[in-house]
Image (spheres, rainbow, N blue to C red):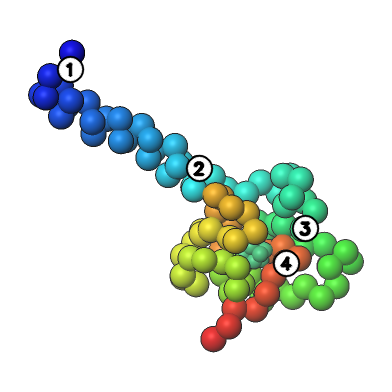
Amino acid sequence: MTSRRTFIAITPACIGMLVAPRVAQAQAAVDEKDPQASALGFVTDSSKVDTKKYPKHSNDQLCSNCQLYTAGAAAATGPCSIFAGKSVPAKGWCSAWVKRAG
Ligand code: SF4
């Protein structure tokens, strides 16, 4: 039988075990070789886009000024609505780029 003292000691550790993997998952960076990323032409550096394949791209199109980048524009990395649970670099780009409103 679990004593009240044991329960109080174990509970925070259990909560930590439940929360930690989600935090780590949120911080995983999108890999350019990931099939979804590759299909969208995702690159971690917007200046490295294949302009023959994506002629409408310009170097001022960045994750940080994309409507789907849910971090503040000044954040170095942040979540993107397209890549759930992962982060993209502020200077990245993909073909789903949409100019941030405002
Ligand atoms: S949708 Fe926008 S924020 Fe997401 S990877 Fe593409 S350019 Fe970056």
The earlier-in-sequence mark between 2 and 3 is: 2
The earlier-in-sequence mark between 1 and 2 is: 1
The residue depicted at 44 percent of the width and 37 percent of the height is: 21
Q: Nearer the viewer, mark 2 or mark 3?
A: 2
Q: Nearer the viewer, mark 1 or mark 4?
A: 1
In the depicted structure, whether residue 92 falls above or below residue 31: below
Q: Name the mark on residue 96.
A: 4
The residue depicted at 88 percent of the width and 64 percent of the height is: 53
Disc 1: which residue: 2
The earlier-in-sequence mark between 4 and 2 is: 2
| Ligand 1 placement by image quarter | bottom right
State the residue lying farthest toward the top: 1
Disc 2: which residue: 25
Label 4 within 8 A of ligand 1 by Cβ: yes
C-alpha gap between disc 4 and disc 2: 22 Å
Question: How would you rate the neighbour count of disc 2 (Cα within 10 Å): few for under 14, some for 14-19, many for 20 or more?
Answer: few
Disc 3: which residue: 41
